[in-house]
Image (spheres, grey):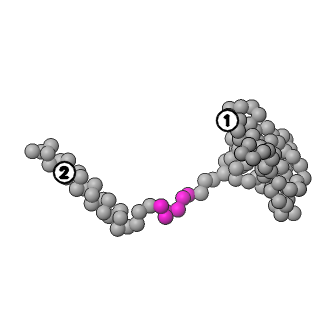
Amino acid sequence: MSLKIRLARAGAKKRPFYRIVLADTRSPRDGRFQEKLGTYNPILPKDHAERLVIQEERIKYWLSKGALATDRLARMFSERGLMAKPAIPSQTKKNQPKAKAQERLKQAAQAEAKAAEAPAAG
């Protein structure tokens, strides 16, 4: 049985509030869980003390037993020093221009540089 520390949504429509729970990976997001480990209120400012309330000892215990935290919680826990900061994967290069477009951009930049030098020399 694999366990995850994850967020379970509570709260009203457009007013999110999350419980930090330990749950089986096969159980639904807001469904059955083994233990409540804290709360997260994203509406509060980042420096507010009650934005993230956690039971650090229980989280350390479950992490040592092999429970995995979700990506969002891993970042929050790393800020508190409970675990190592997760690696951010490198982005794909699909959003960058293709080879011909890069060549055209390079030629345009060279032409601008020559145009800028010509009046300065004259």
Q: Is 43 located above or below residue 62 in the figure?
A: above
Is 103 colored magenta in this rendering?
A: no
Nearer-N-terminus badge (2/1): 1
Residue, x 25% and y 56% (percent of image)?
110
**Given the current orientation, which residue lies at the most extreme front position?**
13
Residue, x 88% and y 54% (percent of image)?
33
The amino acid at mark 1 is: Lys
| SS under mark 2 | helix
Residue 87 percent across, percent down from the top left = 63, 53
Q: Quadrant of the C terminus?
A: top left
Residue, x 44% and y 61% (percent of image)?
96
Nearer-the-camera pick, 26 or 4: 26
Residue pointed to by mark 1: 46
Q: Which residues are magenta?
A: 90-95
Residue 119 percent across, percent down from the top left = 14, 45
Q: Is 79 located above or below residue 66 in the figure?
A: above
Residue pointed to by mark 2: 115
Q: CA distance from mark 2 to mark 1?
A: 50 Å
Q: Is 42 located above or below residue 91 in the figure?
A: above
Label 2 Cα crowd, 10 Å radius (few <14 / some 14-19 / many 20+): few
